[in-house]
Amino acid sequence: MIEVKHIKKTFGDKTIIDDVSVKMDSGKCNLIIGSSGSGKTVFMKCLVGLFVPDAGEILYHGQDFIQMNGPEKKEIRKQIGMLFQGSALFDSLTVEKNVMFPLNMFTTDSYRQKLKRVNEVLDRVNLEGANKKFPAELSGGMKKRVGIARAIVLNPQYLFCDEPNSGLDPLTSLVIDRLIKEITLEYKITTVVNTHDMNSVMEIGDHIIYMHQGLKEWEGTNKEIIFSKNDKLNEFIFASEFLKDAKDMRMLEMSGKIDNDRNMDDIMNNDAPFDVSQ
Amino acid sequence: MHFFTELGRYLMLIKGMFSKPENGRMYWKEFMHQCSEIGLGSMGIVVIISFFMGAVSALQTAYQLTSPVIPKSTIAQIVRDTVILEFAPTLVCIVLAGVVGSKIASELGNMRVSEQIDALEIMGINTKTYLVLPKILAALLTIPALVIISMGLGIMGGRVAGTMSGILPANLFDNGLLENFVPYNVVFAMSKAYTFAFLISSIPAYYGYYVQGGSLEIGRSSTKAVVVSCVAILFADYILAALLLND
């Protein structure tokens, strides 16, 4: 579990994160959402220790990460896996060597044991047989999956994903989202995902934190977000007309005006709440 | 003010390199890799420059020594001393600042921009120790070795050019090499080689490690690293000459 208490981060005279407090539970996908420039990347970088907050506490299972000394921080970092926006794979190493890197650095296992573990995680992310490929030979989705494999190879307790779907097509995004969700449940880890992809929000958002101009504007689940009364959040999530229509549709369903069991063609042709021709 | 900020950050980078390695075997592997990249990777250019540098030096010295009073073997002495004192350590290191410096700066810059350094940090690895220290140690080991090779090749170049052009026969050149040889000159040259090796590796590492932006900035920082390294080499060359060659 990660608990963040009143953290603040400024660059010069600009406040990027302002008094944000949040609790992130194990075995759940915690999503940080918000438009570009809302401070979510800085917030995540503070959580993993790439930035030091000006004030506040970041507690990993009750221990304040900010107050820890170097060796203590290193111990916590060994329990952290991170998937970067650009995957951050080592260009000169093959997929196998990339995934094996943390094992080489932090374990004394034999090569055979390490290879077994690498193959296990590569199988887990559906990349069996890609061992000898170099990052330049992989598609965007494959790179992300290698990134996930490298992040989970040491069985971390915390998984951080920075915009896991950026640059991916909707179908591959869905695969990555589901993979993150499955891994979270399987390994019972605390997953923190930084995204502005509404599909991800609806697909894996067990706990959602909406950030706006450095402040935590809203907190809830993917079931609650669609009915939120927060204007700023609504402006963000319903920037897409389609989602606005989907919300109307859901409202109609809930109020009983649309029968869920009815044929979809009937709904579309007769009382669709949006203009089908568009 | 900006200069002192940069200098402070550079010194902090150097200080930050000294920490206990997470895994000695991985660091040794990285060190050996860098030895191969810096040492073997630059061997070709060093061989070519050194040989021709000595050859040209022999021809130009002969061209200027027209007096019949001065023995021909003096040409060998002048070639030997210029190659050992200046050409091999300084000229070769300036070329290496371009070859090795740009490579180090762009490699680290690319790792920074593509978040590979962040990835290592999050794994709990001290990136200054893992990425910068092996480069500096490898440079300290291989660049002085390259300078020694350069000295030998430079003198050999002078001998070959002298013999082939008929300026002085090989036996006369060899005799000249042994006359008035000051071993301290080699010590001085090696002091320069170690100093320059440190500058060539640490300055580009600094510019690469702290690069911000994208591919354009990587190019800029690479260029800046080479320019600053060359200026630092010339400055250090003067300081060392003033300190170590003053009787």
Image (cartoon, coloured by chain):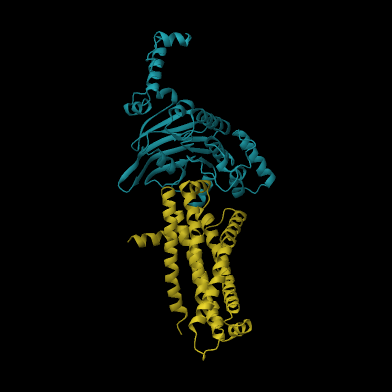
Q: Residue at x 42, y 67 (%)?
A: B231
Is residue A259 in sight in this rendering? Answer: no
Compared across the picture, whether A270 is left or right of B123 comes to: left
Task: Return the x and y of residue B232 as percentages of the image width and height.
Answer: 43, 67
Of the 4 image quadrants, the one containing the N terminus of chain B is bottom left
Above or below residue A171? Residue B126 is below
Is residue B45 in sight in this rendering? Answer: yes
Task: Return the x and y of residue A116 as percentages of the image width and height.
Answer: 67, 40
Number of numbered callouts drawn: 0
Q: Chain B colour?
A: yellow
Q: Residue at x 41, y 23 (%)?
A: A224
Above or below residue A275? Residue A22 is below
Task: Return the x and y of residue A91 as percentages of the image width and height.
Answer: 55, 47
Q: Chain A colour?
A: cyan
Task: Return the x and y of residue A138 as percentages of the image width and height.
Answer: 56, 39
Above or below residue A236? Residue B219 is below
Compared across the picture, whether A96 is left or right of A166 comes to: right
Of residue A77 and residue A97, the one placed in the foreground of this image is A97
| Residue that sits furthest to the left in the current view | A13
Compared across the picture, whether A270 is left or right of A110 comes to: left
Of residue B227 and residue A95, the one placed in the foreground of this image is B227
Above or below residue A189? Residue A113 is below
Q: Residue at x 44, y 71 (%)?
A: B236
